[in-house]
Image (cartoon, helix red, strand yellow):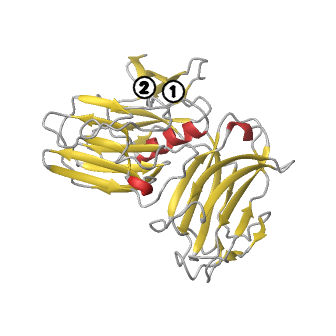
C-alpha cells in the first residue's frame, strides 16, 4: 500500500451525522505501517493505534471487534490483540465501504485485500486466531458453527436419544447436563452411549434420565498431544546454534523472572540480553505428523525485542526433518509482550504427513539490545 496516504481504510462504515465514521486501516504518512481503528460516535471518537508496524510486501491480517454490552473495542493484528478501548460509544452504521474511508477525504487503499468477513457477533480471541490460521493455511473463512443437537426424542420412559451434527469427527465427544440452568457447572453423563459418526457428521447419543427436566449439551474433547515439552526434563533432542547463539535452558532471572510451569524455560539468555547481530535458532526434536489432516502448535512466549521487524524480530519456522527443507514461516513478531502470552499457530498443509522440526529464530542488528525471547510449554496437537 501507499505509505503516504492519510489514514487509509481497509474497511469503513458511515452513519447519519458522522463526523468521521468507523474505520479499520492504518496510520498516516511515512509511518502508515501501524494498523489503526477509528470509531466515531457523534462528536466523540475512540482511536486505537497498534504499537507495532506491519511489514509491507507480505500478507497481514487485521481484525476488530465491538461488543455492544461491554462497549469493548479491540484491535487484532495477525491474530493477536494490539490495543483496546473498554468504554467506546458507538452509532449504528448505514453504509459499508471496502478500501475507502466512509466519511472525510475519500482516499483509496493502495494495496491488495482478500478474505473480508463480517460476523453478527463479536468474535472471541480464539475465533480471531482461527481466522488468522485459516488464512495462513490458505483455507476459507470459518463459519464458527457449534455442535448442534438436530433431534432429541424419547426411546422409552427413561431413555432419550440425541442426534448431533459435529464438525469434529476425529475427536472423542462427551454429553454434559444440568438439572437446572442455574447450576454453576455442567456435569458429564458417564453413562451416555455414543454411536458411530456418519460420513456426513451425524452422531447419535443415548442417555438415561429419571428427572422430569434435564438440559444437555454435547462437546468435542481436546485431542491428545502429538508432542509436548515443558523443559523440566532436560529438553532431550532440542538443539540450538547460529550467529550470536546464547539460547540457554534453565531458570530465568531476567525477562519474565519465572517459567509458565515448573522452573525451566528456553531463552536467548537466562540472565542477560541477547547478543548483537544475532541470527540464532532453537530447533525442536523431530515431530511425526504422518496421518494428520490438520495440526497446530501451541507455546508460551515472553518477548522483549525492539519493535522494528526489519532489523529485530522473532520467527517460528517449520522444516522437513529428513531434508531440512524450509516448509514455511508461521509467525513473525517483534516488540514486547505483556508478560507471558500463549500462541496458537496452525502448521502449514505441506508439513502434514511428514516428520518436521520447529525452528524458533531471533534476529537483530547491533543496536537496541534487550532481554530477548523466552519459550515454555511447547505442544503440537492434531485438529
Q: Say which mark, if any, is on residue 148.
A: 2
Q: CA distance from mark 1 to mark 2?
A: 7 Å
Location of the C terminus by quadrant is top right
What's the residue at 73%, 74% (across, down)?
A: 244
What's the residue at 55%, 21% (across, down)?
A: 201
What's the residue at 54%, 62% (across, down)?
A: 334
Q: Nearer the viewer, residue 346 or 184?
A: 346
Q: Residue furthest right?
A: 323
Residue receiving disc 1: 166
Residue 247 % position (x, y): 70, 73
Q: Residue furthest front?
A: 4
Q: Nearer the viewer, residue 66 or 190?
A: 66
Q: Is residue 180 left or right of residue 161?
A: left
Whether tag 1 and tag 2 are in contact, CB under 8 A, the answer is no
Residue 356 % position (x, y): 77, 48
Q: Residues within 10 Å of mark 1 (few under 14, many from 20)?
A: many
Amino acid at each position: 500500500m501507499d505509505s503516504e496516504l492519510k489514514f487509509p481504510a481497509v474497511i469503513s462504515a458511515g452513519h447519519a451525522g458522522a463526523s468521521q465514521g468507523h474505520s479499520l486501516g492504518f496510520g498516516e504518512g511515512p509511518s502508515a505501517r501501524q494498523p489503526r481503528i477509528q470509531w466515531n460516535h457523534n462528536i466523540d471518537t475512540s482511536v486505537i493505534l497498534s504499537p507495532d508496524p506491519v511489514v509491507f510486501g507480505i500478507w497481514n491480517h487485521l481484525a476488530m471487534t465491538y461488543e455492544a454490552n461491554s462497549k469493548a473495542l479491540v484491535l487484532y493484528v495477525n491474530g493477536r490483540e494490539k490495543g483496546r478501548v473498554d468504554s467506546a460509544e458507538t452509532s449504528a452504521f448505514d453504509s459499508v465501504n471496502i478500501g475507502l474511508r466512509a466519511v472525510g477525504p475519500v482516499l483509496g487503499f493502495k494495496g491488495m485485500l482478500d478474505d473480508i468477513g463480517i460476523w453478527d457477533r463479536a468474535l472471541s480471541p480464539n475465533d480471531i486466531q482461527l481466522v488468522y490460521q485459516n488464512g495462513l493455511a490458505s483455507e476459507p473463512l470459518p463459519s464458527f458453527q457449534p455442535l448442534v443437537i438436530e433431534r432429541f426424542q424419547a426411546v422409552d420412559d427413561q431413555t432419550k436419544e440425541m442426534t448431533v451434527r459435529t464438525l469434529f469427527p476425529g475427536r472423542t465427544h462427551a454429553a454434559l447436563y444440568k438439572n437446572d440452568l442455574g447450576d454453576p457447572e455442567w456435569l458429564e453423563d458417564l453413562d451416555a452411549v455414543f454411536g458411530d459418526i456418519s460420513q456426513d457428521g451425524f452422531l447419535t447419543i443415548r442417555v438415561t434420565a429419571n428427572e422430569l427436566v434435564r438440559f444437555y449439551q454435547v462437546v468435542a474433547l481436546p485431542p491428545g498431544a502429538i508432542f509436548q515439552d515443558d523443559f523440566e526434563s532436560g529438553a532431550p533432542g532440542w538443539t540450538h546454534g547460529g550467529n550470536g547463539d546464547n539460547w540457554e535452558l534453565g531458570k530465568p532471572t531476567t525477562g519474565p523472572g519465572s517459567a509458565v510451569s515448573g522452573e525451566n524455560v528456553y531463552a536467548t539468555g537466562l540472565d542477560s540480553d541477547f547478543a548483537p547481530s544475532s541470527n540464532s535458532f532453537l530447533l525442536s526434536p523431530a515431530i511425526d505428523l504422518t496421518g494428520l489432516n490438520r495440526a497446530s502448535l501451541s507455546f508460551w512466549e515472553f518477548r522483549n525485542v525492539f519493535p522494528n521487524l526489519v532489523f529485530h524480530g522473532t520467527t517460528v519456522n517449520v522444516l522437513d526433518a529428513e531434508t531440512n527443507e524450509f516448509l514455511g514461516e508461521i509467525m513473525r513478531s517483534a516488540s514486547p509482550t505483556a508478560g507471558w502470552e500463549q500462541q496458537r499457530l496452525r502448521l502449514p498443509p505441506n508439513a502434514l504427513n511428514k516428520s518436521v522440526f520447529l525452528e524458533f529464530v531471533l534476529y537483530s542488528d547491533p543496536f537496541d539490545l534487550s532481554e530477548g525471547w523466552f519459550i515454555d510449554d511447547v505442544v503440537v496437537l492434531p485438529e
